[in-house]
Image (spheres, helix red, strand yellow):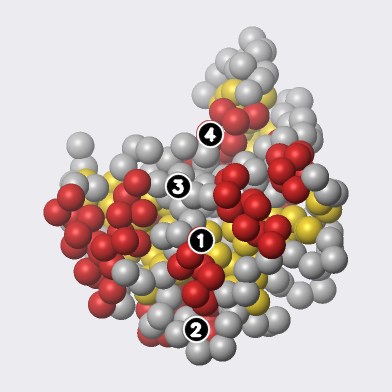
């Protein structure tokens, strides 16, 4: 087994060390219930700048800031009444709220979108919540990968992206979902800016009102809206039943397909399982030398909408 000098098990000692690093302004990698995050102190512009530099992320693409509680969010943002309803139901969890920032919040302006709004989330991951509480600062944490590349679900994949450029990668095997959080904004209508595990149907059931799906946006209001995103670095073809020459095939459902080019997203036709496997299989196909990836049709319902959103952007 290969040794990596900056990958550490998420022990109490290492979680405390991670908390102190975050508070001091260092950038490290932390697992969440969705994907790995490249994390830094959201109160320090120097830390936020380092996140952008490491990822080579465009400056107009804002960051999600993580908090330990809704009360912590209320201290720095104007919280919409519908946000409170959703937070009671889904937070901590894979949902992000885009809210107006309060004056003198102390939050680095570099994390905000062009409308001076902040994307806020309360993660549902024991390690991340422990770091939030011990560091006592809000944490900016986009996905731990180079900009526009496939998100990471394993510590070793984070290391492949950044090597020794970051001091610490905390290693746990407890990433449950595998896709980034649902992002929503509030106004005369409730709008999904990025689909995720918290689906349109779930939101509407809780709010008892219509929620609109992602549309074409003139400006980037939240992460995940770039046209080209989540790319494995080779062509991706959607709604395919057969692989292309020297290509891999991602299969959804129970088929009798075999070969080194065949990768099953889910043999059980489970959208949740497919979501958890998607990024790992996109990375694996590229690493095994395939020059393109074809993907079976994915039902466009529930978390399937989020899978199709990521694949559409990966295909670019």
* Residue with the mark numbered 4: 277
- The numbered mark, 3 or 4, whose residue comes first in the sequence reads 3
192 lies above or below 167: above
Separation of disc 3 and disc 4 at Cα? 19 Å
Identify residue for label 2.
105
Q: Is residue 275 visible?
A: yes
Answer with mark 2 or mark 3, whichever residue precedes in sequence: 2
Cα distance, mark 4 to mark 1? 31 Å
User: Which of the 4 image quarters holds residue 247?
Assistant: top right
The residue drawn where x is 41% and y is 68% is 139
Label 4: state its secondary structure. helix
Q: Position of residue 309 (x, y in %)?
A: 72, 48
Query: Of the residues under marks 1 and 3, which one precedes in the sequence?
Result: 1
Instruction: Point out the tag, 1 or 2, that comes first from the N-terminus.
Output: 1
Q: Residue at x 71, y 72 (%)?
A: 220
Residue furthest to the left in view is: 13
Give the position of the N terminus as an image quadrant.
top left
């Amino acid at each position: 087994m290969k040794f990596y000098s900056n990958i550490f098990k998420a022990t109490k000692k290492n979680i405390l060390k991670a908390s102190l690093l975050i508070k001091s302004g260092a950038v490290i990698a932390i697992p969440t219930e969705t994907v790995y995050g490249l994390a830094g102190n959201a109160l320090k512009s120097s830390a936020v700048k380092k996140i952008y530099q490491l990822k080579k992320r465009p400056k107009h693409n804002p960051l999600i800031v993580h908090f330990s509680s809704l009360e912590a969010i209320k201290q720095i943002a104007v919280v919409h009444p519908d946000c409170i309803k959703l937070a009671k139901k889904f937070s901590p969890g894979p949902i992000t709220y885009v809210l107006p920032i309060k004056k003198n919040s102390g939050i680095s302006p570099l994390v905000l979108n062009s409308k001076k709004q902040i994307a806020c989330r309360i993660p549902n991951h024991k390690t991340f919540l422990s770091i939030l509480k011990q560091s006592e600062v809000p944490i900016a944490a986009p996905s731990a990968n180079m900009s526009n590349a496939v998100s990471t679900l394993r510590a070793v994949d984070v290391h492949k992206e950044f090597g020794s450029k970051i001091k610490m990668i905390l290693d746990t095997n407890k990433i449950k979902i595998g896709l980034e959080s649902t992002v929503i904004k509030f106004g005369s209508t409730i709008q999904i800016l990025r689909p995720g595990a918290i689906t349109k149907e779930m939101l509407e059931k809780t709010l008892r009102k219509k929620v609109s799906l992602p549309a074409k946006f003139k400006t980037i209001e939240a992460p995940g809206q770039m046209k080209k995103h989540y790319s494995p670095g080779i062509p991706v073809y959607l709604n395919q039943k057969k692989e292309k020459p020297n290509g891999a095939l991602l299969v959804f459902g129970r088929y009798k397909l075999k070969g080194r080019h065949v990768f099953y997203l889910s043999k059980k036709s489970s959208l949740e399982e497919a979501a958890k496997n998607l990024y790992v299989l996109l990375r694996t196909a590229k690493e095994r030398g395939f020059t393109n990836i074809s993907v079976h049709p994915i039902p466009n319902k529930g978390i399937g909408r989020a899978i199709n959103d990521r694949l559409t952007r990966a295909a670019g």
